[in-house]
Amino acid sequence: MFDLALSRGTPAGAAPAAQDALLAQVHELAAALGRAIDAKDSHTMAHSEEVAEVSKLLAAGLGLGPAQAQAVHVAGHLHDIGKIGVPDAVLGKPGRLTAEEWTRMQAHPAMGADILAPLSCLSAMGVVAMVRAHHERFDGRGYPDGLAGAAIPLGARIIAVADSLSAMLQRRPYRPAMGFEAARKEIVACAGSQFDPAVVAVFLRHEERLRRLAATFREAGPGRRPAVS
């Protein structure tokens, strides 16, 4: 379980209303920063927002409380913020990345965590740890730290599934978009290796809701964001 500890990101003795107001502001900031990252590449427009919405649904399905699900939602918006430091030529390259380019791409989770680390409220919510670990694999073969299983923050295990779903459903410079059913099969096939089987099980239980949510993003069209909460 990731560390939430929201109270550590608010003044001592702050009233619940003040904590709620701070969390709302944090969410607004996270959404804005996620959009800034997505704007670097038209192929990923609204990607961070989609990852945030899918992550929140999966978090709730796993039984996390509203505040914990909201922390995962915020981390979903911010998961790719480290791509600020990845050259546009690498992000938008239509062909296979060279070894050097892949190394630069793999640096973005740690870079994102470094960017966010000075924001104590995000560290207290577990957002920084989730951003750093969202490309870890359940089998320990991910990056940047080679974490495995329960050593990976739960929020990061959730975001890994949401991120992969959104990425597969979007057209990228190096491949066409996949349909939901093909993406679903890929996620199921990677349960226990890339993904936490418990998160995949929740994905399957809420498959129809996720299918409708994904369709909402696809129907909005390139460069437009759907009306989701």
Image: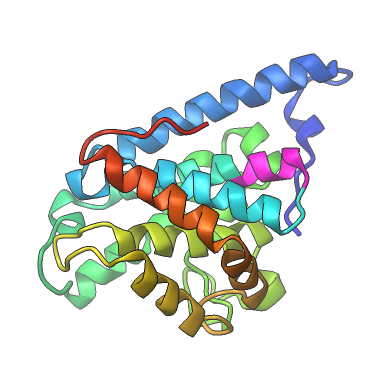
Q: Residue at x 33, y 41 (%)?
A: 46
Q: Is residue 55 left or right of residue 1?
A: left
| Residue 110 at x, y percent in the picture | 46, 57
In this rendering, is residue 129 above or below 102?
above
Q: Residue at x 48, y 58 (%)?
A: 162
Q: Is residue 178 left or right of residue 164?
A: left
In terms of depth relative to the viewer, which is nearer, 172 or 206? 206
| Residue 158 at x, y percent in the picture | 59, 60
Determine if residue 58 is in view.
Answer: yes
The image quarter containing residue 125 is: top right
Query: Residue 66: within the magenta?
Result: yes
Q: Residue at x 48, y 68 (%)?
A: 144
In this rendering, is residue 43 above or below 105?
above
In this rendering, is residue 186 above or below 34?
below
In terms of depth relative to the viewer, which is nearer, 56 or 174? 56
Q: Is residue 90 left or right of residue 50?
A: left
Residues in magenta, as a range: 65-72
| Residue 131 at x, y percent in the picture | 52, 52
Determine if residue 114 is in view.
Answer: no
Classify the position of the N terminus by image quarter: bottom right
